[in-house]
Image: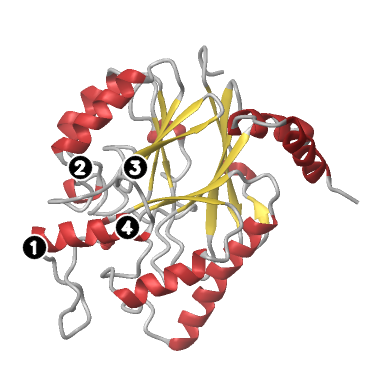
Amino acid sequence: MLSRRSFIRSILVGLGAICAGDWEKLVKAAEGRAYYRVVVLGDPHLPVRILHHPHKADQEKILAAKNAVIDDINSWPDVDAVAVVGDLVEQRAVPKEYAYIRKFFGRLKHKLWVINGNHEFLYRDQPRPDGKPVVADPAVWKRKLEYFRTFWQLPKRWYTKEAGPYHLIFLSAEGALPTEMGDEQLDWLTKDLAAHRQQPTLIFFHGPLYNTLLNYNDKVNKERTIAMPEKRLHPLLDANPQVKLWISGHTHTPCRNASFAAKGINRYNENTYDIHNDCMDRKKIVTNSLFLYPDRIVVRTYDHHNACWLTGLDREFPLYGTES
């Protein structure tokens, strides 16, 4: 017997040409849901950061936890896409890391959207004798960034997607700071935002916006850990109130931290909030899901270790009017 999805697909094929957006709307209506769901993965660091987890037993547990996340996501029938906010590689973006990435994400059954973090370009292939990475020169950055683009078959390292009424922007860290954008990319972003002022917009970037975390350690809210250049981004976001969420990684902020899901802290300006995502290089992993409704965005956090939603971290962001 045909499933409901297969039945609708067969009808649409029989009807002839139909655009992808209309197809998705029909399927979502048939499934009884009025939202797009995007699962966000923060900093996978594949396969495992050996410098932080030198013991083989710990590495095996972390790998098992990461693979279980893919199993969970594959089991969720309402997922439209998975977005990874950078640092997919363990440390230095060398071939063995990419080989594992290909195998790992090859198991994923949903659409995948990726951006690079600092670990995709910033370091030399060869580490120091103690295993720590060494910052490379700009020529290496350029080579590694281009490899990332070609590996993922991206037309450009920064790009956009559409999800119903939403406009999604994916940006690239590119140096000289770990979470900095260059002039060409910022010029493109300025033009893209101007062309989509009427669409609620989400921006995915490796680094978080300035002052959207408490100063819970001596690294957060510093130039090396925020989206840069802040002096250019701040007026740009103020001028584009359609930007509702900025989705970031990099800081590895755990869900138990008071900064993780506190709207008063995560608020950047009058209209934009930062959604922080913990890294996946842990034995117990949580992920955020973005539920994009026509009139609001709901953000929920799932505990993959305990197989449950952390309902105390649920957040809702209305698109229109003021918050209650």
For label 1, the residue is 137
SS state under label 3: loop
- Between 159 and 56, which is closer to the camera in this rendering? 159
For label 4, the residue is 150
The CA distance from mark 3 to mark 2 is 20 Å
Crowd class of label 1 (few under 14; some 14 to 19; many from 20; radius 10 Å): few
Q: Which of the 4 quarters of the picture holds residue 185? A: top left
Q: Residue at x 56, y 28 (%)?
A: 164
For the residues carrying marks 3 and 2, which lies nearer the camera in this image? 2
Mark 1 or mark 3: name the one nearer the start of the chain: 1
**Position of residue 299 in the picture relative to residue 307 (left or right):** left
- Between 90 and 171, which is closer to the camera in this rendering? 171
Dots 1, 4 in contact, CB < 8 A: no
For the residues carrying marks 2 and 4, which lies nearer the camera in this image? 4
SS state under label 2: loop
Mark 2 or mark 1: name the one nearer the start of the chain: 1
For label 3, the residue is 213
Q: Residue at x 43, y 63 (%)?
A: 44
**Position of residue 279 in the picture relative to residue 64 (left or right):** left
**Position of residue 12 in the picture relative to residue 190 (left or right):** right
The CA distance from mark 2 to mark 4 is 19 Å
For the residues carrying marks 1 and 4, which lies nearer the camera in this image? 4
Dots 3, 2 in contact, CB < 8 A: no
SS state under label 4: helix
Q: Is residue 18 above or below residue 295?
A: below
Mark 3 or mark 2: name the one nearer the start of the chain: 2
Amino acid carrying mark 3 in the image = Leu
The CA distance from mark 2 to mark 1 is 16 Å
The image's mark for residue 181 is: 2
The CA distance from mark 1 to mark 3 is 30 Å
Q: Quadrant of the C terminus?
A: top right
